[in-house]
Amino acid sequence: MPGVEQHVVLIVDDDPFIRKLILTTLEGVSSFDLHEAGDGQEAVETARREGPRLVFLDIDMPLLDGIEACRQMRLEPAMAGAKIVMLTASADDSARARAAQAGADRFLTKPFSPLDLLRLVDELGSP
C-alpha cells in the first residue's frame, strides 16, 4: 500500500505448521512484511538482512537454539528496538530465565490460538 510503512516481522520455528499458523494469522495485517526462517542460524541471517521490528522465535530448534539466536540478534544495532517473542512448548522456568537474559521481551506458550497471537501483537503495539 503506498504511503503505509511496513513493519518487518520474522517468524522462526523449525515446525512448518507453527510458521504457517502465525503467517496465516498475520498476513491480513497490511502493515506487516512477513518473513520466515526454519532454524536459529537462518533467523540471525534473516534478521541482519531484513531488520525486523517483531520476531516470533522458537526456543528449541536445530543448528542454533532460539536463546542463542535471540542473544545474537540483540547484538545487532538495528535490532535494538525490536520486540522478540519466544515461542515455547514448555513452561520451563529456567529456559524462560535464560531467554529473558538473552533479551526476549515476551513468551507465548504453544499450543496457542490465532486469537492469543493477535492479542499479543495488539498488546505489543505497532512494532
Image (spheres, rainbow, N blue to C red):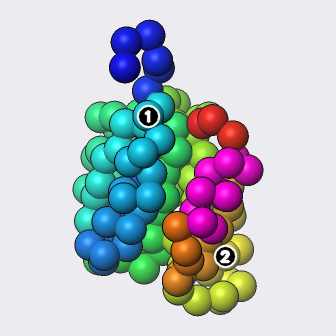
Mark 2 highlights which residue? 96
Mark 1 nearby-residue class (10 Å; few <14, some 14–19, many ≥20): few
| Mark 1: secondary structure | loop
Q: Is residue 7 magenta?
A: no
What is the magenta range? 115-124
Relative to the observer, which residue lies in front, 72 or 91? 91
**Between 121 and 14, which is closer to the camera in this rendering?**
121
N-term mark: 2 or 1? 1
Q: Is residue 29 above or below residue 72?
A: above
Name the residue nearer the viewer: 32 or 47.
Answer: 32
Which secondary structure class fits the magenta region best? helix
Crowd class of label 2 (few under 14; some 14 to 19; many from 20; radius 10 Å): many
* Residue 57 image position (x, y, % from top left): 47, 63
Give residue 30's mark.
Answer: 1
Quadrant (top left, top right, bottom left, bottom right) of the C terminus: top right
Residue at left offset 29%, top offset 34%: 49
Residue 122 percent across, percent down from the top left? 68, 48
Residue 102, by quadrant, is: bottom right
Q: Mark 2–mark 1 contact, CB under 8 Å?
A: no
In this view of the protein, which residue sits in the foreground, 108 or 49? Answer: 108
Q: Amino acid at mark 1?
A: Ser
Residue under the image location 70 percent in, 74 percent down: 97
Residue at 47 percent of width and 41 percent of height: 29
